[in-house]
């Protein structure tokens, strides 16, 4: 049996409750490129997922730490969906996917890594993008480095946001 060495994942999987909330901490650091924050709006921001399901996996989150969908303000709710639409358009013109998964994992049981701070996933998909690696090895194969994806998407935004 072969092993894939990924020691950087230990802080993510060891004790998720001990982690600081990335959706609160990263926007406050004002290091958008380093934190892969693609752009900001008034009520929400868009960032790349550090552990993506596929290249271009984006997340839209409100700045406010809120875990319940019913607690979102109208501005936050509208911002989530408006930016989800903008993310789909951006990904269509930059990475040319065949489809998308768009949605939320609400609560730890539903798979939320940061259950206290909801966020919307926008995941580009391609025909045949699932192969034996996720099924047999619980491993995803990504064709492009996260920093390269960030640079490509940022360049495609131009003067937009």
Image (cartoon, rainbow, N blue to C red):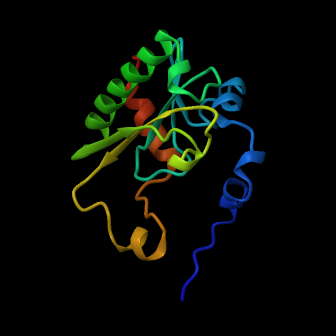
Asked if residue 26 lies left or right of residue 104, the reply is right
8 or 12: nearer the viewer: 12
Closest to the observer, 155 or 85 = 85
Q: Which of the 4 image quadrants contains residue 78?
A: top left
At x 59%, y 30%, the residue is: 67
Which is nearer the eye, 61 or 46? 61
Q: Residue 97 appears in which quarter of the rendering?
A: top left
Of 110 and 30, nearer the camera is 110
Q: Residue at x 32, y 63 (%)?
A: 130
Q: The N terminus appears in which quarter of the rendering?
A: bottom right
Relative height, residue 157 to residue 5 (above, below): above
Name the spot of residue 14 as percent of width and height, x first.
73, 59
Residue ID at (50%, 47%): 110
Q: From where the camera sits, is residue 121 visible?
A: yes
Residue 74, percent across and down? 47, 10
Q: Relative to residue 135, is residue 98 drawn left or right?
A: left
Instruction: Give the vertical position of 17 relative to 92 (above or below).
Output: below
Looking at the picture, how far across and down is residue 142, in whole percent? Answer: 43, 59
């Amino acid at each position: 049996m072969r092993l894939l060495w990924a020691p950087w994942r230990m802080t993510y999987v060891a004790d998720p409750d001990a982690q600081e909330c990335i959706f609160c901490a990263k926007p406050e650091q004002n290091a958008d490129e380093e934190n892969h924050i693609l752009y900001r709006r008034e009520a929400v921001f868009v960032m790349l997922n550090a552990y993506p399901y596929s290249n271009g996996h984006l997340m839209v989150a409100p700045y406010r730490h809120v875990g319940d969908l019913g607690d979102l303000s109208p501005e936050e709710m509208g911002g989530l969906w408006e930016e989800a639409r903008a993310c789909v358009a951006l990904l269509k013109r930059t990475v040319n996917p065949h489809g998308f998964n768009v949605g939320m994992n609400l609560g730890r049981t539903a798979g939320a890594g940061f259950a206290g701070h909801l966020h919307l996933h926008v995941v580009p998909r391609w025909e045949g993008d699932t192969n034996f690696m996720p099924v047999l090895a619980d491993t995803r194969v990504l064709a492009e480095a996260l920093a390269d994806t960030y640079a490509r998407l940022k360049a495609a935004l131009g003067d937009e946001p």
